[in-house]
Image (tube, grey):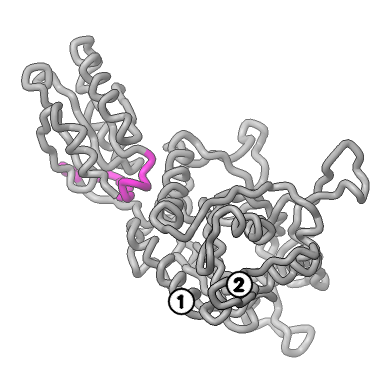
Amino acid sequence: MPVSMEELVRLCKTRGFVFPSAEIYGGFRSTYDYGPLGVLMARNVKEAWWRSMVQLRREVVGLDAAVLSSPRIWEASGHLDNFTDPLVDCRSCKQRWRADQLPVAEGSAPAVPGQPVYTCPNCGGHDFTDARPFNLMFKTFAGPVEDEGSVAYLRPETAQGHFVNFANVLQTEHLRPPFGTAQVGKSFRNEITPGNFVFRTREFEQMELEYFVPPSESAKWFEYWCNERFEWYVHFGIPRDMLRLRHHDTEELSHYSAGTADVEFSFPWGWGELEGIANRTDFDLRAHSAASGQTLEFYDPNSNERYIPHVIEPAAGVARTMMAFLIAGYDVDEVGGEQRNVLRLHPRIAPYQVAVLPLSKKDTLIPLAEEVLAMLQPVAMCDFDVTRAIGRRYRRQDEIGTPLCVTIDFTSLEDKAVTVRDRDTTAQERVPLDNLVEHISARLAW
């Protein structure tokens, strides 16, 4: 069943996925901390992405570029001049907003013919200042003296680290197009109006691939990555009817893009971007080559051809992806005549893959339960819970998405077997301890 934003936020807070940052001090707008379950799930999302994009591909290698870097990078890339949003102030309540995201007031007569009348989401007013460009870069200083010579910026995207390292990767890895560099890391954007929980924040983590291709093949690879990335979300459990691939209209395209498509997800507030796939052409490598004086091109000794590759960029947000999996997996059903909340997460996305549950706290059971835990920890992320009745513990594991529960009861002391319970079906199976690791590994296989 569809989950509301209120229910999603409640689940994340009460079950330890996401906490408001600095909550004991009243919070800090648009910042969040990942709790014990959230950090596990976010890590699983990143590992699933890395496995698909790097581990299972022979032509993609990893990269981890610096967050702080030379301002010349952002000058060459166009971020200092073009990385802006239109900022307006509501004259009534003084709140600031992105002009292109304000709701249009239906039926109001515009002061300027042909221009829509907008509504302030805070006070309902319609009187705004003229839009002015607001640069989204976080500015700071590197070094002990705060002057123009020490200005630096927190990166607003991870992409530029790929481009300025293009020659280094070519030299060390001896790759030839098509090939890619993949990176997972933090980016920072001084958003005017962050919102929708962790969907739009000023500090966020990206999973990004820059795929370098011969110029004549860029259209083919753009289509390939659009399909590849869409199917990745389906593979890990998001229903197709909750996803769509939307190609940008010409007026939406970034200055560097020859084509962009978004994998969009049906969030509680409507369709929103999960991942963007862009054909960046040779804009970035050509710009950095011109600004740095360094040659950033590929030489093919077989054809004696030199060219600057075009770049296809699939870029996804960790928090948005995690949020989509939570929403898609949330369900309410009935077990034993009682309603239960359950997260039907893919085993490799779920925070815990296995919960080890001794039926009782008695000393006779705990040592065996701890042995079982030690057996399973090398093959899966495990929870160990001895609190409350077993039924309540099952419900908790269902709500946090744990695919399998392993219960150790008093019979286990005699028959050397445990009960394995399935989250989705609640079916239970008796498994000998000697076969338990093999059984669990098979159930959790990629």
Left or right relative to 20: residue 117: right
Quadrant of the frame with the N terminus = bottom left
The residue at 76%/63% (across/down) is 294
- Residue 142 percent location from the top left of the image: 82, 42
The residue at 64%/55% (across/down) is 168
Tell me which label, 2 or 1, sits earlier in the chain: 1
Secondary structure of residue under mark 1: helix
Q: Which residue is mark 1?
A: 223
Q: Does 342 lie within the magenta span?
A: yes
Secondary structure of residue under mark 2: loop
Q: Does 393 lie within the magenta span?
A: no
The image quadrant of residue 281 is bottom right
Which residue occupies the extreme bottom position in the image? 113
- Residue 57 percent location from the top left of the image: 41, 58
The residue at 13%/27% (across/down) is 434
Give above or below for 160 relative to 243. above
Q: Residues within 10 Å of mark 2 (few under 14, many from 20)?
A: many
Left or right relative to 196: residue 121: right
Q: Disc number at residue 309?
A: 2
